[in-house]
Every structure is written in structure tokens, then in C-alpha cells.
Image (tube, helix red, strand yellow):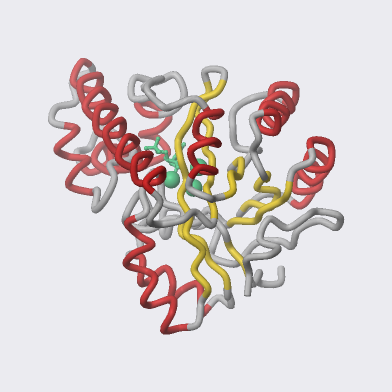
Amino acid sequence: MLPSFIDLHCHTTASDGSLVPEEVVKRAKSNGVRVLAITDHDTMQGYDRAKPVADELGVQLIPGIEVSSSWSRCEIHVVGLNVQTDSPALKDLVQEQGQRRLARAEEISARLANLGVKNALQGAQEFARGEVCRPHFAQFLVKAGYVRSMSQAFKQYLGNGKAGDVPCCWPHMKSVIARIQAAKGVAVLAHPGRYRVGRTKQGALVRDFSIYGGDALEVVVGGQPAVESQHFARLCERYQLQASVGSDYHGETTPWTDLGRIGALPQGCQAVWQGWVK
Ligand code: AMP
Ligand code: MN
Ligand code: MN
Ligand code: MN
């Protein structure tokens, strides 16, 4: 696979990535990425740290964020790209999401306590260097010996339908799209193939995303087979959406993907970055 010059989805230690923002930019540069968006879960803190390094290395850093939302009892991720970093709408959104994350972390901890897992919140916070995310609980569960691996932690405690899957709390996808656009960003439906829904519901999700005014679909995702990307390219055409690409790199916890190691957009797609990439 040819390295992609653009990667619009990745994580740093500001959320659940394992590299600090500066290291992510350096790795992107050495992987041949010239345009990068850091899209941490519900926070922009990584951007502020990464920006000076990106400027120094000549990497164009697009302000980005991955916002947790809900739709039809599913947790759906909406990536906001090219948001205005000083926008009050963005600041309010980030602050509210942070409060929800903290409340959710407390609830996860209480639920785990019911299963005999003590001090989970404190344990997760020891791994978090920014927002507390479920993988930090997974790391704690591994370290404390409750499970052997992160994937086991999700299977037993944190994944779909398990105690630590708090169906909360996140704002509806429709309002998240509007909030991202109020911050002058474009709203991208993240990794549409990763939600545990069948093809019919997946189609309904993309249709609703488009009806709510969403801008683009993440057509190319790290580790996703090319045939899937073709499928999402067709959905873009059908629902008049632009297309984005992203590795969803998290560092050592996602060894199947790396910055810029993603396929090209299928022909016929309208790149979401047209107009803002130098
Ligand atoms: P949160 O945003 O706190 O709900 O955490 C969700 C994150 O957990 C996702 O973005 C993934 O990085 C990670 N994750 C979700 N499911 C799994 C899984 N089965 N195994 C490992 N990591 C997962
Ligand atoms: Mn993540
Ligand atoms: Mn995601
Ligand atoms: Mn992500």
C-alpha cells in the first residue's frame, strides 16, 4: 500500500492514544504524512501541544476532534475537522463532553464495584494522561489481574452490553453535527463499518447522518478491506456526502494500523479536504 499524504483520524495521550502529541506528529512526518488531523476523543488538548512541532516539521495540522454521540441506542463517533479552535461553540462542547466523561467514568467504576472490582476509577485515572476513556479501565483491569488482555477486558467488562458499557449520556448525533458546524468545522461519520449493526441499520445510520446535515463519511479507515471502502464510497454517492480518510491510529494498542498507512479514496469520491489543504 502506498503511504497516504493525508491522515485525518488519530489519537494521542490526550485521550486513549499511547504517544504524546509531539511524537504523533513526528511519526506522521516520517511516515510521509503531510496533512494530519489529531482527533482525540472529546478533547482538543493534543492539538495545542502538537501545533508548534507540526509547524516546525512542515506538517499541516488540521484542528480535529472525535465526538461521542448517540443514535438509536448506539454510540456513534462523529469526527469534527477544520474546526475553529477558539470557537465558543467548540469550547462549550468540549467542556460538556468532559463532564459527561467524568460522570460516566464514575458510573463505570460503581458498576465494576458491584462485580467485585475495587477502586476502578482511581486505577483508570492512573493510566489516563487526559480524558478518561474505557481503554484506561481496560489497562487497569489487566494490571490488577482481573483479565489477561485489553480485548478480554472489553469482552468481559467494558464492551457492548457489559457492565462498563454505560448507555448514557452522550448527546444525540444530530446535535453533535450541529455543534461541530457551529464551530465552523465539517462533521464526518467516523469508521461507519465499525458499529455493531447489520447492513440495513448501517444504511439507516448513514441516511440519518445525511438528513441531519452531516458533511462526510470516513470512507477509508485503517485496517479496513478495500472492498468495504468501495461500499462506503457508494453510500457517499447515494446520500450526497463527501469522503474522508483516517488511520484511527492509537499507538501500540492498535498495531494493525499506522499513521498514513491507509488506502487511497476510491474514484468518484469528493475529498472532504478539498479547499483547505495547502
Ligand atoms: P470511550 O470513548 O471511552 O468509550 O472508549 C472507546 C474506545 O475504546 C474506542 O475508541 C477504542 O479505542 C477502544 N475500544 C473499543 N472497543 C474495544 C475493544 N473491543 N478492544 C480494545 N479497545 C476497544
Ligand atoms: Mn479510542
Ligand atoms: Mn471511534
Ligand atoms: Mn478514533
- Which residue in the rendered view is the most extreme toward the top? 114
Classify residue 178 by image quadrant: top right
Frontmost residue, 36 versus 214: 214
Where ligand 2 lies, by image quadrant? top left
Image coords of residue 190 (percent x, y)? 58, 43
Left or right: 277 as drawn, with respect to 65: right
Task: Decide if residue 142 is in sight here.
Answer: yes
Image coords of residue 92 (percent x, y)? 34, 40
23 up-or-down from 137: above or below: below
183 up-or-down from 257: above or below: above
Frontmost residue, 143 versus 161: 161
Exactly how many numbered labels are in the figure?
0
- Which residue in the rendered view is the most extreme toward the right? 268
Q: Please name the residue shown 41% across and 84% down the image.
A: 56
Q: Name the quarter where the C terminus is drawn.
A: bottom right
Q: Please name the residue shown 49% across and 54% down the image.
A: 83
Task: Decide if residue 256 is in sight here.
Answer: no
Classify residue 174 by image quadrant: top right
Left or right: 142 as drawn, with respect to 156: left
Image coords of residue 146 (percent x, y)? 25, 32
Q: Name the quarter where the N terminus is drawn.
A: bottom right
Image coords of residue 267 (percent x, y)? 85, 58
Q: Please name the residue shown 70% across and 48% down the image.
A: 219
129 up-or-down from 147: above or below: below
Frontmost residue, 85 versus 49: 85
